[in-house]
Image: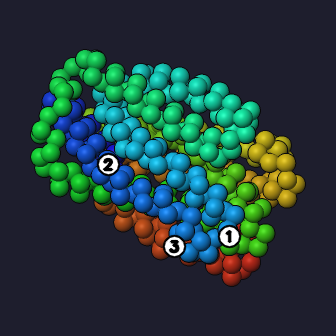
Amino acid sequence: MGSALETLCGQAFGARKLDMLGIYLQRSWIILGTTSALLSFLYIFAAQLLKLIGQIAAISKAAGIFSIWMIPQLFAYALNFPMAKFLQAQSKIMVMALIAAAALVLHTFFSWLLMLKLGWGLVGAAIVLNASWWLIDLAQFLYIISGTCGRAWNGFSWKAFQNLWGFVRLSLASAVMLCLEIWYFMALILFAGYLKNAEVSVDALSICMNILGWTLMVAFGVNAAVSVRVSNELGAAHPRTAKFSLVVAVISSFMIGVVLSLILILTRTKYPSLFSSDSQVKELVNELTPLLAFCIVINNIQPVLSGVAIGAGWQAIVAYLNIACYYVFGIPLGLILGYKLDMGVRGFGME
């Protein structure tokens, strides 16, 4: 839902309507805070919901405990994403990078301390994640209100409560567009829990999804950059420059995806050991690597195109495309390959 702010702030900045950026930011906080309160019930009853849909007891219990401890992070997201889009629209990227770098150092140290040294496990992981996100939120908020954003932040205003419904509609379209993409990958892991030898399948697929997520961070960086550039240029009535930005971003992201895929293929017999000591899991990750490499190349392009759609305000169109590609075609094909043709987790990778 925060990506709606990316469209509005980017175009407002391009049109030099700087006073509206702070109003848009506050509207987004109101909407996302309310949404987080509603979504928190899913976190509270996660264990029961997973058992209801047939997940094994061990996975349901672990996920349920972790979900409850992650509720503070849900509200941290509601503050963080609007601030990130607010700053991105003004090309204030370096300060965000420095804040994230500092949080990463602290996050790494305390993850080691709580999870490995003190043996707190998933609870320790949740505490560190919550603390890291709230630290980022506090640092970004202090930066915004310190006067560094000029006319873009004029303090809190009652105008934030005006025209909320129009903002909600764009926010919902943005949420549907992005959630359909994220939920698709989560659904694959969920379905893997129903396969034979489910623990090995879930472990191997989770490793692949984590690697895919890491490589996609580069693509999401390009996504943010092209979204800001396109929205700024459209706000300034420069459509040709926006189109040129699209071409450059797609080519750059594609080449990065090719390089990362080659690295994975060349190290396919070695890198699984970094994630697991189980020989079955490592063998399955090795087999899935070619599919993972192909997926990285394709998925390095897709976020860039999504960024262009966000910059142009086309979230609703992309949401319909995501429904068709992921849920009408992708998941049914994966279920047929995985269950009907007995290809297991490999079938999920081929979809």
The residue type indicated by label 3 comes to: Phe
- Marks 3 and 2 in Cβ contact (< 8 Å): no
Quarter placement of the C terminus: bottom right
Q: Where residue 329 is drawn, which disc sits there?
A: 3
Left or right, 7 with respect to 220, comes to: left
Q: Nearer the viewer, residue 64 or 194?
A: 64
Marks 3/1: CA–CA distance: 27 Å
Residue 25, position as x, y percentages in the image: 25, 37
What residue is pinned by disc 2?
32
Element under disc 3: helix
Element under disc 1: loop
- Marks 3 and 1 in Cβ contact (< 8 Å): no
Residue 261, position as x, y percentages in the image: 68, 45
Left or right, 206 with respect to 39, comes to: right
What crowding class fits label 3: few (fewer than 14 Cα within 10 Å), some (14-19), or many (20 or more)? few
Q: Nearer the viewer, mark 3 or mark 2?
A: 2
Residue placed farthest to the bottom in the image? 340
Choose top left, top right, bottom left or bottom right for residue 180: bottom left
The residue type indicated by label 1 comes to: Ile
